[in-house]
Image (tube, helix red, strand yellow):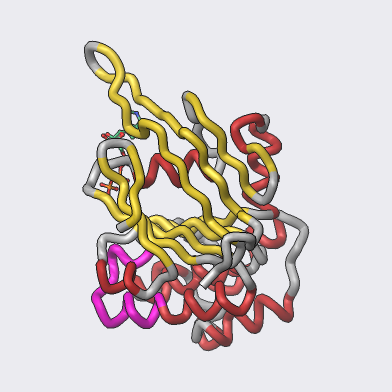
Amino acid sequence: MHAPETPAVLTLTGLRKSFPAQGGSVPVLAGVSLRLADGETLALTGESGSGKSTLLHLIAGLDRADAGTITVAGQDVTAMSEAEAARLRRRTVAMIFQAYNLIPSMTVAENLAFHARLAGRFDPRWTDELAARLGLAPLAGRMPDALSGGQRQRVAIGRAMALRPRLLLADEPTGSLDEDTAERMMAALRDLVADTGCALLMVTHSPRLAAALDRRVHLSHGRVAAA
Ligand SMILES: Nc1ncnc2c1ncn2[C@@H]1O[C@H](COP(=O)(O)OP(=O)(O)OP(=O)(O)O)[C@@H](O)[C@H]1O
């Protein structure tokens, strides 16, 4: 459990976002407020189209909110320039997607190191440890198209954690995996975030995976409530 006085890595206040649609605009987020403590793990559930990915994109500074504030590690994301948001994604916030988004022309080892190198914080010992813990060492020389879905997702986790982020955003990271593979991947991910003190905000449709995290919130009609 995290005491209320634990510093927040993420604070959302009154977040609003609409998208243009035929005949006007459609509100997707209608006043989302949320606090995530340092090192806390939170599952975000919600119907398809409820705005979960939109919320993650706003937090990562990949899209702009219409109103409200987003504070990540004490920094106001809503006030950031593109360059500042890009710096935030290199230094503080990492992302994992359902579709893995590995670089197809690079080996597993190169993929693992890529973002950390770009961010100027590549640490070969840490990357080797990640590869070992994620069972990727024997696959280091393989190309992504020669990996299974579960193996690809483990590379994506390693690549994100190689940055030593304070906040990891995961958008249905187990969505394409069978249940056993998803559970194993989740166990590896939970161990890594616990050992590094990283907070995790994970979108999932799986009640089982959600139950394994510290806290659960549900997004519905543009607002989040405890689930
Ligand atoms: N760039 C965009 N332009 C217009 N509408 C968008 C855009 N991005 C998202 N939307 C709309 O916003 C709503 C929320 O989309 P979002 O992808 O955030 O939902 P989600 O909860 O992640 O859904 P899923 O579980 O299916 O991935 C949807 O109705 C979607 O069509």
User: Which quadrant of the view contains residue 87?
Assistant: top right
Q: Is residue 204 above or below residue 48?
A: below
8 or 206: which is nearer to us?
8
- Dividing the image into four equal quarters, which quarter contains ligand 1? top left
Residue 80 in view in this figure: yes
* The magenta segment: 173-186
User: Which quadrant of the view contains residue 85?
Assistant: top right
114 or 181: which is nearer to us?
181
Q: Residue at x 41, y 64 (%)?
A: 215
**Residue 205 shown in magenta:** no
Q: Is residue 39 above or below residue 16?
A: below
Extreme-top residue of the structure:
23
Q: Residue at x 38, y 45 (%)?
A: 53
Extreme-front residue of the structure:
4
Number of numbered discs visible in the structure rendering: 0
x then y, percent, for residue 172: 35, 59
121 or 26: which is nearer to us?
26
With 169 as the anchor, is 51 left or right in this view?
A: left
Q: Is residue 76 above or below residue 124?
A: above
x then y, percent, for residue 42: 44, 62
Which quarter of the figure is the C terminus placed in? bottom left
x then y, percent, for residue 132: 57, 87
With 87 as the anchor, is 176 left or right in this view?
A: left
User: Which quadrant of the view contains residue 206?
Assistant: bottom left
Q: Residue at x 75, y 72 (%)?
A: 123
Residue 99 in view in this figure: no
x then y, percent, for residue 27: 31, 26
